[in-house]
Amino acid sequence: MKKQLLSFILLSLAITSFAQITVTNNDIAPAGTTIYLANDTTFLGDIIPGEPGANKTWDFTNVQSNTIDTINFILPSATPFGDAFPDANFAFSSHDIETGDVYAYMVRSDDKFSNIGYAINTEEFGFAYNHVEPEDIILDFPVAYQNAYNELITSDMVIASPMPGYDSIRTKSTIVKETVIDAWGSLTIPLGTYDVLRQRVDEEQTDSTFVLTSGIWIFIDEFGFGSTTYSWWTNDVNIGITLFSLDIDPDTEEVNGISFFAGSYVGLNETNVVETKVFPNPASNLLNFEFDKIITGELVLMNQLGQIVAKKHINGQSIIQVNISNLPTGVYVYHSTNNSGELLSSGKILKK
């Protein structure tokens, strides 16, 4: 009996030890990957990060996908502004309705994963970019429990002024940042359960605003604020990015934002040859695909594992309907091709 008990204890220790992971550069998704991050605006008051420590369990299965952000992992040479960041060897791109096209320029190695600047391209302000100095370390490899580091980061961005009488607006930011891997354990989200490390980042940021008039920069205002972010990272190669994130007001401890991994695809290009409107999106029953021209070919719908869940022949049509009522809730990717197999359009839909 004692021998059986000892064996059980040793087995339990082995399982617990295996769950305490490390995250390396090899666990981050490669260039050419499109990643979908879901945002939950419903359960902001019901999710808490919990206490730091070892062998923790987090169950966030009730989170909902209210909106989806698309993050493209690319090389700097594939962006419009790569020449402004010659030290970057990796980049993210995304599109926001309010800010327009956003690019983040990174330095990625086996030692660390760092941000060295951003670029934006908006209809209102045009192109602008800022360099982060010395660098903003996102991950310090190998990422392990109780690793910690502090940073002092500055950035400087100049944009064209929308106000008459001023040529430009300048924002100088100073960020004091503290990062610690404060917990490890298992995390459950709608996609499944994963071994994770939890990263806590506390920031105090001060923004100073200036305007340029008659060749002179004039100080306007200074504003300071703090933030706390909890991010759960896994070494599961099928994820390749933050698995789950909470943005928290450090003063009130209220959750301001929830995002979580909703799927990824390698080689998916959302630059469409045929413009396609998909509505309603999110949808629960019928999904409409409206093309800007008459096409003949095929439309395919795939789940997060890349499995085909629906297929529709397009026979000289500019609009088709697909019934998705029998599909589970989640993120799906569609692509349409012509009879020669050439990609015409692709994108994502959300089944609610």
Image (cartoon, rainbow, N blue to C red):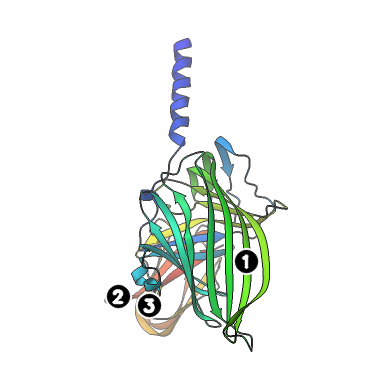
Q: How many marks?
A: 3
Viewer-proximal residue, 277 or 142?
A: 142
Considering the numbered disc 2 on the image, is that residue within a helix, a strand or a loop?
A: loop
Give the spatial CA distance, label 3 vs label 1: 53 Å
Furthest toward the bottom, the residue is: 164
Where residue 30 sits, quadrant-wise, is bottom left
Residue type at mark 2: give it: Glu
Residue tagged by mark 2?
342
Mark in the foreground, 2 or 3 = 2
Is 174 above or below relative to 149?
A: below
Residue tagged by mark 3?
314
Viewer-proximal residue, 301 or 219?
A: 219
Residue tagged by mark 1?
207
Where residue 23 sits, quadrant-wise, is top left
- The image shows residue 36 at horizontal and vertical percentages of 47, 61
- The image shows residue 249 at horizontal and vertical percentages of 67, 55
Tell me if 280 is positioned left or right of 292 in this view: right
Considering the numbered disc 1 on the image, is that residue within a helix, a strand or a loop?
A: strand
Residue type at mark 3: give it: Ile
Residue ID at (60%, 39%) = 52
Give the spatial CA distance, label 1 vs label 2: 48 Å
Viewer-proximal residue, 254 or 166?
A: 166
Residue 147 visible? The answer is yes
- The image shows residue 33 at horizontal and vertical percentages of 38, 61
Q: Residues within 10 Å of mark 1 (few under 14, many from 20)?
A: some
